[in-house]
Image: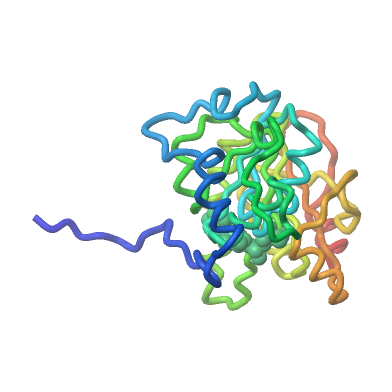
Amino acid sequence: MMVAQGPNPNRFFGRRKGKAIKGSRQVLMERLLPRVALAPPAGALDLTRAFGVAPKAVYLEIGFGGGEHLAELSRRHPDIGFIGAEPFLNGVASLLAHLNGSHLKQAAHAQLDAGRADNVRVWPDDIRLLFPFCADGAFERIYILYPDPWPKARHAGRRFVNPKNIADLHRLLSARGRVIVATDVADYAGWALDQMARSGLFEPENADVHAPPPGWVETRYEKKGLAAGRAPSYLIFRKKKPVGKKGLDLSVKKVHNAIE
Ligand SMILES: C[S@@+](CC[C@H](N)C(=O)[O-])C[C@H]1O[C@@H](n2cnc3c(N)ncnc32)[C@H](O)[C@@H]1O
């Protein structure tokens, strides 16, 4: 019997491949990716055993693009486990080159310095496919940096910061965790703020949204935007405190004013 299929809620609308991956990057995809890729889980994913180290905490970066931010953060924090998700395979190849130290060189050593990627695992696909396998509170930080803005109203359902994903982010974030959304599209910043506030699950933490968090690492999209004169917004969210608990009373309206 044929079962009627509804629209796939996890349909991916971005690009998976750009120009052919050749030469040194192809070597990295063949030799290095198998070492750092997360295998599709058969059941619940035990992130304490997913890395070559026992991580103090696990951070997730969704849509790492060229991997500049992920490579640098994982280098700075060898005791943190990093999961990076990116379905665009040319981006995955770029991350591998950053990890390998050969990003601007022709040679593909494909031999990481000992331990270099022990704290990095790559999910070369849509992160939403991994969510069901991850435990509640698995991540202490979740980065969503320069998400595709999908500016047309009729494409608004494709924006990553949407009610379904927000509910998943809330489940997956630890009690003390933070979700960090960066964008230089003011409309998207306003949208993300509203969606998070309307969910009733998150509250903004920072009023000065144009000030980069300490030690911030610029992404490729961020650098391009800055060069073109666009102003980034950094929206930091934490889980909303239960009513009655004292927290920072940061009104969403105040943050909206700061974005504009
Ligand atoms: C505009 S790019 C920004 C890349 C990078 N974060 C930067 O700032 O340079 C957005 C990236 O998010 C990725 N992306 C979109 N939806 C995703 C999803 N569901 N899971 C993982 N990555 C996703 C896209 O493939 C794309 O590379």
Question: Colour scheme of this structure image?
Answer: rainbow
Q: Is residue 248 above or below residue 195?
A: above
Residue 21 position within the rendered picture, expressed as x and y whole percent measured from the top left = 54, 64
Q: Splitting the image into 4 quarters, where does residue 223 fall?
A: bottom right
Q: Is residue 20 above or below residue 180?
A: below
Quadrant of the rendered image holding ligand 1: bottom right
Q: Is residue 167 left or right of residue 60?
A: left
Q: Is residue 125 left or right of residue 120?
A: left
Residue in the picture at 79% in, 70% down: 224
Query: Viewer-proximal residue, 237 or 113?
Result: 113
Residue 108 position within the rendered picture, expressed as x and y whole percent measured from the top left = 64, 53
Which corner quadrant holds the N terminus? bottom left
Q: Is residue 18 above or below residue 215?
A: below
- Residue 193 in sight in this render: no
Which corner quadrant holds the C terminus? bottom right
Residue 142 position within the rendered picture, expressed as x and y whole percent measured from the top left = 67, 43
Q: Splitting the image into 4 quarters, where does residue 132 fall?
A: top left
